[in-house]
Amino acid sequence: MVEQGTFTAAAEQLDCPKSRVSAAVARLETAIGAKLLERTTRRMRLTDAGKAVYRDVAPLFARLREIRQETLAREERVQGVLRIATPYEFGAQQLGGVICRTLAAHPALDVAVEITQGLVDPIRDGFDVAFVVVDTDLPDSGTVARRIYHVERGLFAAPALAVSLPPQLRPEDLANMPTLTTPGDTVWEFTRDDQTVSVPIRPRMQTHNAELRLQGALAGLGIARLSVIYCEAEIAQGRLVRVLPDYPLPPLRVFALLPDRRLQPRKVRAFMEAIESMMVSELAPQAGAGTGSEPGLEAGTGAAATGLAEGEARPAG
């Protein structure tokens, strides 16, 4: 404000109301215990105490402005360490390629990937981007949640097990049958004619690894809940059949959690742009294979694409 000459000019420079500038000066005077400015309707001048304070703090503000300019200059480049949290299979299958391409495009960037499971708080845990997979809505965590895509799921069993099921199978019948599930699954929900049925299940195998659940289903060990597109080859070969196809299951939803909507580092923006490009170019063609697609939650930033989700991606190699 001293440099601008008036409260009005200072308020314009700071892009805030003049009353806020005046109130800030009053709080500073109260905190210091001395009057810093003499003000009239026509002019403003520093008191002796004000001159002393300004003499001490002016170099600090000058250095802050220099640091801001240096930071802005750095942010024009994609550099630093990008910290990513992701479930294993989603990271290996979907993110592996886009991470490698991002690193190749930006030599000054490094990436640190940590394998996680369940909900992650990017602010608390220190991640720039955290990918999570859920079959319900995300709880309100104060972070920015960008929905990447969702994937249809179904129940599948080996033909030998399927022929032993009741002819008029109902969801409730699953309560007495072996199932292959993800850890923590105790209830499966089914929806038909706007009615939801919750069925307690008896897991024989529990694992986040979809390949293990698929192998268990092929071996006839139980009914597995898997991505529909993940099982296409086995269904086409007659090695798996779908169970209760008339009762849709809630889809899996993949979200990218970001610490803040504003002032995102250039490295984060570059990575999310690469994610969008990857989803559109590599996964959108699969929309015709039976999986639904949804736009991201943030207009103009979410990727409109479909694909496999965590637990539903075959490990590379």
Image (cartoon, rainbow, N blue to C red):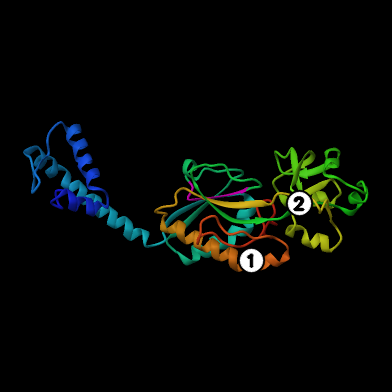
Tell me which corner region of the image, top left, top right, bottom left or bottom right, holds residue 91.
Answer: bottom right
Q: Position of residue 277 (x, y in %)?
A: 55, 66
Density class for disc 1 (Cα within 10 Å; few <14, some 14-19, many ≥20) is: some
Tell me which corner region of the image, top left, top right, bottom left or bottom right, holds residue 202.
Answer: top right
Amino acid at dot 2: Pro
Q: Where is residue 317 in the image (x, y as percent from the top left)?
A: 69, 60
Sequence order check, earlier mark of 1 and 2 = 2
Give the overall secondary structure of the magenta segment. Answer: strand
Q: Where is residue 99 in the image (x, y as percent from the top left)?
A: 54, 60
Density class for disc 2 (Cα within 10 Å; few <14, some 14-19, many ≥20) is: some
Question: In front here: 117 or 190?
Answer: 190
Q: Give the structural element (helix, strand or loop) at label 2.
A: loop
Q: Which residue is drawn at 62% across and 67% down?
A: 282
Q: Which residue is denoted by mark 2 in the rendering?
A: 248
Report the label total. Answer: 2
Q: Which residue lies furthest to the top in this view?
A: 33
Q: Which residue is drawn at 73% across and 60% down?
A: 229
Distance from disc 1 to disc 2, alpha carbons, whole Å, reads: 22 Å
Horizontal side of residue 217 vs 39, given as left or right? right
Question: In front here: 177 or 16?
Answer: 16
Q: Which residue is drawn at 61% across and 62% down?
A: 305
Q: Which residue is denoted by mark 1 in the rendering?
A: 284
Amino acid at dot 1: Ala
